Image (cartoon, rainbow, N blue to C red):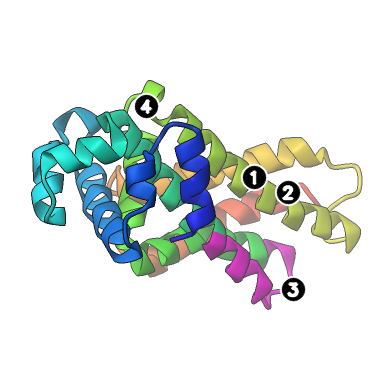
Amino acid sequence: MDENIIVGLERDGIVTATFRKLSPDKKQRIYYEALLAFGSNVFDRVVLDDIADSAKISKGSLIQYFSIKENLLGFVSEMVFQNYYEYWHIYFVNETAVRIMERLEQFILGFEKYSENNQAEGKFILGMMYSNSAQLSRQFCQKIAALERRHIQDIIQEGVRTGQIRRDVKIERLTSLIHMLFTGLIKDRFFNRGPANTADFEEQVINFLDLIFKGLK
């Protein structure tokens, strides 16, 4: 857990100085139990007493650390965003694909891989995107979307630079289209009983990208 982020959250009034001074292990335990709670239920159904019991602290201590439940959600949101940010950073550092369509395909499939390796965080992101109210989730979802769009735009710009995508393409519009495809496929996969397995999901992704790329060459 990045202590610099905790300092920033204290400055913003999300966590208290008392929380910042806890041991890393205790902070991590509180984060994980809150992550499980918010990832499994909508905000109104999350009970602070249950989180406190699971984290082996008193409810009074939990309130002392965060004041209100919204702040606890804000803390979890920031930690999950950093985890997601680092995942994509490492992914692109180690990426080996050259063809732009393959890069976009792997990017879309990357959320499923992220969720497999970070199940609690994956459930939390999906819950914030599709289950919680816009008032609670707007800022988090905007940050997640901005991160995803930035990576998609970088891939598209590389496609234009290498001649795999027409130079007259409107990069921002194509970025929006691919991102809408990305979020739509993810929602269909996890919420609307879409493709039952990874192989079928991959085929669905390829088919949609193929339709888009036919007009880009």
Q: Which residue is mark 4?
A: 136
Disc nearer the start of the sequence (4/1): 4
On the image, the x and y values in percent for residue 38 come to: 25, 42
Give amino acid for label 2.
Gln
Q: Is residue 20 above or below residue 28?
A: above
Mark 3 neighbour density, 10 Å: few (under 14) some (14–19) many (20 or more): few
Specify few, some or many for label 2: CA neighbours under 10 Å numbering under 14, 14-19, or 20 or more. Answer: some
Residue type at mark 1 is: Arg
Q: CA distance from mark 3 to mark 4?
A: 39 Å
The answer to whether mark 4 and mark 2 are in CB contact below 8 A is no
Question: How many numbered discs?
Answer: 4
Within 10 Å of disc 1 (Cα), the crowding (few <14, some 14-19, many 20+) is: many
> What is the quadrant of the C terminus in the image?
bottom right
Which residue corresponds to mark 1?
149
Of labels 2 and 3, the one closer to you:
2
Per the rendered image, the range of residues in magenta is: 86-101
**Residue 18 lies in the magenta-colored region:** no
Q: Which residue is painted at 25% across and 53% down in the image?
A: 30
Q: Which mark is in front, 4 or 2?
A: 4
> Label 4 vs label 2: CA separation?
27 Å
Report which residue position mark 3 lands on: 98
The earlier-in-sequence mark between 2 and 3 is: 3
Image position, residue 7 (x, y; %): 50, 46
Q: Nearer the viewer, residue 89 or 179?
A: 89
Q: Do the CB atoms of the residues marked 4 and 1 lie less than 8 Å apart?
A: no
Q: Is residue 103 left or right of residue 115?
A: right
Q: Which mark is nearer the camera, 4 or 1?
A: 4
- Tag 3: amino acid: Val
How far is mark 2 from mark 1, CA to CA? 6 Å
* Amino acid type at image mark 4: Leu
Q: Toward the viewer: 24 or 108?
A: 24
